[in-house]
């Protein structure tokens, strides 16, 4: 863990140095926007343990696939890249059974990913991404019952979903590749088909699930420790059509 934190510090320190150097060729900064789909490639023991616990309690668990949508603003020079990330994670319960108690899992977070370009040609980038995400997870249990208006009026709290929350800081590192496409006309002057394979590791190994005035004592903590695959599209708008500016 200490070695990973040291590598993270050195990477962000070197990127900051390149951006601050007025004589560096990396000062030629390009900005773009990226939309990724992110998917877990391996089984996750903590995710499985939560689903098993729900089954034991008679709750239909959420799906086993861990997936997220990632929106990112990207900055890059000749030798480096940086992405500011917004992560929207979801594992929905797709069962249609009525009168069954169901579990839902989701998360939202922000993060930063940066690193050097191991290769930069006209058609390809090969990246060494290292970063961290600040995540808030929510687990919800719905009873999904049918009830009359009178029953709801007499005992409204019984028909409200239970919402539990947990937070963590996830460190990630891996390898990325961009395939570059140049456009002669249109809104963008170029776009990348971008993909990454990253291993995520939770910084805090214990994370209690908490609700309103309650802490759950027997629900396993969620740790997203596994390999994730990202694929998406990065678009670099032409300068005169960009809705943002970088100074």
Image: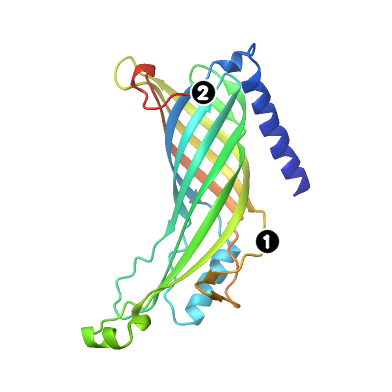
Quarter location, residue 146 = bottom left
Nearer-the-camera pick, 193 or 205: 205
Please say if 137 is above or below 161. Answer: above
Quarter location, residue 193 = top left
Task: Residue at 31% x, 22% y: name it.
Answer: 187
Q: Is residue 155 left or right of residue 42?
A: left
Query: Could you tell me residue 17's position as x and y percent?
Result: 68, 23
Report the residue marked by disc 2. 124
User: Please, what secondary structure does the residue beneath circle 1 have?
Assistant: loop
- Within 10 Å of the Cα at label 1, are there few (<14), some (14-19), or many (20+) other Cα atoms? few
User: Please, what secondary structure does the residue beneath circle 2 have?
Assistant: strand
The answer to whether residue 148 is visible is: no
The answer to whether residue 91 is visible is: yes
Please say if 72 is above or below 169. Answer: above
Report the residue marked by disc 1. 205
Query: Could you tell me residue 230's position as x and y percent?
Result: 49, 42
Dot 1 or dot 2: first in sequence order is 2
Please say if 50 is above or below 79. Answer: below
Direction top: furthest residue = 23
Task: Residue at 33% x, 21% y: name it.
Answer: 241
Q: Label 1 to label 2, Cα distance in Å? A: 37 Å
């Amino acid at each position: 863990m200490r070695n990973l934190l040291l590598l993270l510090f050195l990477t962000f320190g070197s990127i900051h140095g390149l951006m601050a150097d007025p004589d560096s060729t990396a000062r030629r900064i390009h900005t773009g926007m990226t939309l990724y789909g992110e998917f877990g490639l391996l089984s996750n023991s903590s995710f499985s343990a939560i689903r098993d616990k729900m089954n034991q309690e008679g709750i239909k668990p959420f799906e086993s696939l861990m997936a997220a949508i990632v929106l990112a603003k990207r900055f890059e020079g000749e030798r480096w890249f940086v992405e500011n990330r917004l992560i929207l994670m979801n594992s929905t319960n797709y069962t249609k059974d009525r009168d069954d108690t169901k579990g839902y899992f989701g998360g939202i977070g922000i993060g930063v990913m940066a690193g050097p370009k191991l290769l930069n040609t006209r058609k390809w980038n090969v990246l060494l991404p290292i970063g961290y995400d600040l995540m808030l997870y929510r687990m919800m249990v719905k009873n999904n019952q049918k009830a009359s208006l009178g029953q709801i009026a007499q005992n409204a709290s019984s028909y409200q979903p239970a919402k539990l929350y947990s937070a963590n800081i996830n460190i990630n590192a891996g390898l990325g590749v961009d395939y570059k496409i140049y456009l002669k006309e249109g809104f963008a002057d170029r776009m990348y088909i971008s993909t990454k394979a990253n291993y995520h590791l939770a910084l805090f190994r214990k994370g209690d699930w908490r609700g309103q005035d309650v802490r759950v004592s027997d629900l396993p903590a969620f740790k997203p420790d596994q390999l994730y695959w990202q694929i998406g599209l990065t678009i670099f708008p032409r300068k005169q059509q960009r809705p943002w500016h970088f100074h």
